[in-house]
Each structure stands twice: as C-alpha cells, then as structure tokens.
Amino acid sequence: MNRIHSVLKTFVVALATVTCSLPCYSWDKKGHDVTAAIAQRHLTKKTQKKISALLDGKTIIYWAPWMDDASNMPEYKYSKTWHYFDIDEGKDVATAPHQEKGDVITAITAQIETLKSNSTSREEKQLAIKFLVHLMGDLHQPMHLGYPKDLGGNTIKVKFFNKEMNLHSVWDGALPARSHDWTHTEWAEELDITDKAAIATIVSGDLYDWARQSHAYSEEIYKGTPTDVNLSFEYVRTWTPVIERQFLNGGLRLAHILNEIFK
C-alpha cells in the first residue's frame, strides 16, 4: 500500500511539474476576448438587451473563445474549416474558391442569416451568435487568410525568442502576448479611442473587403518574416501595430453587424 502511495505521489508531482512548465494563459483566447470586449463597448442598448436575453444574461465576451474548443467536439466537428479561408498567393478573395465544408466568410454569412431569420429557433440563434462572435475575430487574424500551401503558416517553422514554433502560432498567441501584457479590458480601453468618422470608415464595406485587408496583411507577413533567424524584439516592434489595428477593426465590425441584426 505504501509503495502504491509512493508511486501515485511521484506521478502527481511529475504532472504538476509539467503543468507548471506550460504557459498559464491562452492568448489566442485573449485575442477573441479583446475583439468581443471592443464590440461590447459599441453595442446599442437595444442590441445589448436582446443579446443578453438570448445568452441567458451572458455577454458576447463570455462566449468569444468558445468555438475553438467546440470545433473539436463531435457535435460541432462540422465547423472545423470555418475558422479560416486559405487564398493562393496573388489571388483575390472575391474570386478564390471557397472551402467545400465552409470557411470563415461563408460561415459568418450563414450565422448572420440565421440571426436575422424569423423562422429559426432560439437555440439556433444562440449557437449562431456564439459562432459569429468568434468567427469575426478569426477573420481579422491575418494568418487565418494565409496560403493553402503552408496551411496559413502552420508548416513554416520559426524561432520566436529562441522557442521553436510555427508562423501561425506566433500570430495566434505568442506575438500578441509579447506585445502587451494586458487584460482584455485593458486592451479594449487602450485601443478603442477612435473617433466616429474613423469608425464609419472601418465598418464600411463588406466581408470580402475585410477579408481582403486581412489577406493583404498576411502577404506582408510572409514577406517580412525570415525563417532562418530568431524572431524577437524587432519583430514585435514591427508587427504590434497590425495586431492592435486588427483587434480594433474586428471589434468595431462585429458591433456594426450585431447592431444591424438587432436594430
């Protein structure tokens, strides 16, 4: 019995050591929280009230990261391809072929239609808003609109502050984490200082226009990311403004869509 206790104790200690060696935060989730937090600040009172009723008192921030986990659950596995839209180098978003099982543009369009429809159930609308909030964040992560040949940077190996990573992961979490050590509330307060005229410009256009902007950033990132060096302080300094801009754009555009739906 003592031997069993000793083995279990050793296992628990080892597990704790491994767990504590992992990051105690998830900045890919933080990015979605920031996008939703900025959007929340721009929702009309009427929209906030309707969303609160639909989400049983929760805000869109609560559900913002949910889809990343949900897409790995059997009942939502169909949404795995919805997080991105791969576009070949030099191609335009408007003429690029869509994913057969859905992509971020077709998925956002479908959620908007579900929320606007008078024939969809409350449960269908609940699911649609959870998807929509997350997908608007994905639409503004440039590497979610990268090249299919490297799976949006997933097969491009780099070093980020001496850590072996792939380019997609750097942009999903490591780079935002290194740029500012803020809570999602602090991110929103610092970034959301745009005047009404600028906001009107940001929310103009449609999903294809916004996707085209993200893809243009991804092309700049491909060209501006050397794979044979250790990416560090200079890389963070260069690309932090893009992260900030995309968080803000995603939040303002999400609010614009939701206000249009629930007006």
Image: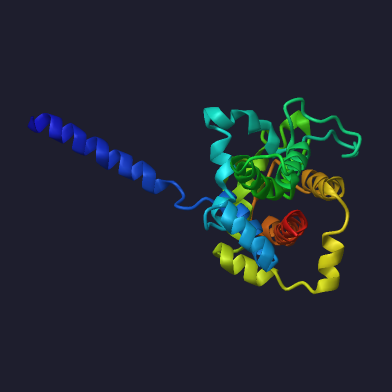
Answer whether residue 93 is visible to the viewer in this image.
yes
Q: State the colouring used for the structure image.
A: rainbow
Residue ranking furthest to the front: 119
Along the line of sight, the residue nearer the viewer: 115 or 234: 115
Along the line of sight, the residue nearer the viewer: 70 or 28: 70
Residue 197 percent coordinates (x, y): 86, 72
Tell me the residue at 82%/47% (across/down). 207
Tell me the residue at 62%/56% (across/down). 51
| Quarter of the figure that contains the C terminus | bottom right
Give the quadrant of residue 199: bottom right
Give the quadrant of residue 15: top left
Residue ranking furthest to the top: 100
Q: Is residue 59 above or below residue 8?
A: below
Residue 67 percent coordinates (x, y): 59, 42
Tell me the residue at 70%/69% (across/down). 192
Give the quadrant of residue 99: top right
Along the line of sight, the residue nearer the viewer: 131 or 181: 131
Left or right: where does residue 77 sit relative to residue 103? left
Left or right: where does residue 209 sit relative to residue 182? right
Answer whether residue 161 is visible to the viewer in this image.
no
Residue 36 percent coordinates (x, y): 64, 57
| Quarter of the figure that contains the N terminus | top left
Tell me the residue at 87%/39% (across/down). 93
Residue 163 percent coordinates (x, y): 55, 45
Q: Is residue 91 above or below residue 100?
A: below
